[in-house]
Image: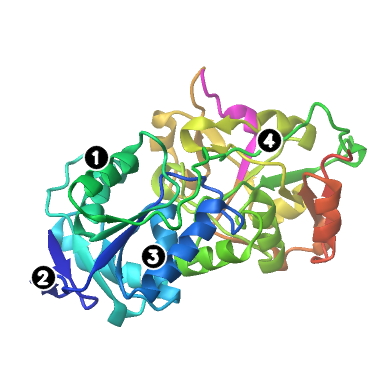
């Protein structure tokens, strides 16, 4: 392994002080301060800092990153195990990690595995190597929420056999992650206000974020998780953020050519909810029942336009100015054309649009009432009961 200080300088060895590692098996992508593993991790970090132990932490999963954040804000010392990467990339990742978590450079070191990266392998493929190294470096192992028979269960047993101290003082029962939110459209009353035959809007439907928002640091993300009784980056919270910032941030996810765009749908709400599907592969919905509706005429004046559906041949023939508005039509299994997508290029600043041309949509009446207190835009619930 390679060892670096916070100035990206390689050093020969780790300090001799005793080290510990806090272990949590995979947890929900929607954590909050009411989760047993979150509260147990906070107590464990406080306990090991009082003992004067240096904590082995890492990045790339919320279980590791929450510990990284907690050790930092509690002013503990930590050694951060980095993902496998080429040696030339290590200084940049160290610098980005310090900035992203707002780390105190005087209280952290970094360890990088020395195995070569393999083309085509994802970061997930190196998680077992990271986990093994973190436990190997520790003198004390604190298993918290551990899945029976899982990787960490095996590693803690190996650590005990090797004579490492196993501290079960903060252990909690493991609970299977629940990442999916359930929406009931069949058993509820659809809001007739959204059944208007004269409805002429395009809608940006939001969804939960399983990490920081664009331009948000991990320090801010984990700070808010520790302060919230519910998941603070849900689709509803995303809508609240947009209403507060009055800006819809663009993304290049799944966009041909990597263009930064904001996507909308021209479907009426009743039709759009038929496409709100759980995408198991990505552990998220295609979109969720929270949206920003913009009058079609206002949208056109702001530069929004329908996408062009087609294949790679069509994309290659488009002018550069039209390529951000191209969308693959998909296949028989996943045909994207029913979404009736519109786009704008770059962020959309709502402050530049007339307020009476914008409506916000929430899933429930209670959410609409709460959001209406925070915004000048009209808020409409999708369902009434």
- Range shown magenta: 333-342
Mark 4 vs 2, N-terminal side = 2
Whole-number angstrom distance, CA of label 4 to CA of label 1: 33 Å
Mark 4 vs 1, N-terminal side = 1
Instruction: Work out which quarter of the rendered image holds the N terminus and state it.
Output: bottom left
Of circles 4 and 3, the one toward us is 3
- Asked whether the viewer can see residue 213, the reply is no
Q: Give percent across and percent down for residue 352.
A: 70, 67
Q: Nearer the viewer, residue 365 or 119?
A: 365
Q: Give percent across and percent down for residue 97.
A: 34, 67
Task: Residue under label 4, please give it.
Answer: 182
Whole-number angstrom distance, CA of label 1 to CA of label 3: 25 Å
Task: Residue under label 2, please give it.
Answer: 13
In the rendered view, does 59 fall on the left or right side of 362?
left
Task: Residue under label 1, please give it.
Answer: 121
* Position of 28 relative to 11 (above/below): above
């Amino acid at each position: 392994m390679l060892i670096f200080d916070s100035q990206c300088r390689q050093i020969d060895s780790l300090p001799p002080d005793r080290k510990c590692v806090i272990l949590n098996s995979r947890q929900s992508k929607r954590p909050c301060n009411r989760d047993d593993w979150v509260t147990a991790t906070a107590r464990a970090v406080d306990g090991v800092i009082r003992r004067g132990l240096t904590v082995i932490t890492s990045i790339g999963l919320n279980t590791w990153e929450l510990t990284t954040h907690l050790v930092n804000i509690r002013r503990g010392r930590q050694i951060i195990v980095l993902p496998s990467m080429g040696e030339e990339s290590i200084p940049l990742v160290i610098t980005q990690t310090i900035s992203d978590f707002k780390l105190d450079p005087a209280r952290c070191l970094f360890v990088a595995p020395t195995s070569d990266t393999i083309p085509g392998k994802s970061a997930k493929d190196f998680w077992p190597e990271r986990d093994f190294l973190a436990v190997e470096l520790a003198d004390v192992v604190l298993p918290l929420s551990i899945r029976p028979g899982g990787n960490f269960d095996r590693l803690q047993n190996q650590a005990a056999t090797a004579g490492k101290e196993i501290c079960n003082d903060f252990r909690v029962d493991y609970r299977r992650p629940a990442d999916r939110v359930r929406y009931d459209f069949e058993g509820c009353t659809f809001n007739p206000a959204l059944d208007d035959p004269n409805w002429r809007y395009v809608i940006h439907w939001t969804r939960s974020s399983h990490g920081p928002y664009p331009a948000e640091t991990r320090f801010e993300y984990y700070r808010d998780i520790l302060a919230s009784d519910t998941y603070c980056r849900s689709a509803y919270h995303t809508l609240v953020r947009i209403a507060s910032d009055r800006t819809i941030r663009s993304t290049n996810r799944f966009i041909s050519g990597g263009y930064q765009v904001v996507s909308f749908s021209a479907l009426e709400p009743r039709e759009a909810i038929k496409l709100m599907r759980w995408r198991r592969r990505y552990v998220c919905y295609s979109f969720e029942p929270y949206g920003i509706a913009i009058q079609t005429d206002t949208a056109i004046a702001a530069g929004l336009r329908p996408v062009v559906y087609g294949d790679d041949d069509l994309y290659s023939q488009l002018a550069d100015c039209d390529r951000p508005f191209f969308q693959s039509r998909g296949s028989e299994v996943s045909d994207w054309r029913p979404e009736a997508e519109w786009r704008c290029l770059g962020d959309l600043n709502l402050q530049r649009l007339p307020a009476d041309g914008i409506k916000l949509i929430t899933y429930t009446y209670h959410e609409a009432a709460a959001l209406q207190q925070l915004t000048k835009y009209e808020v409409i619930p999708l369902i009434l009961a």
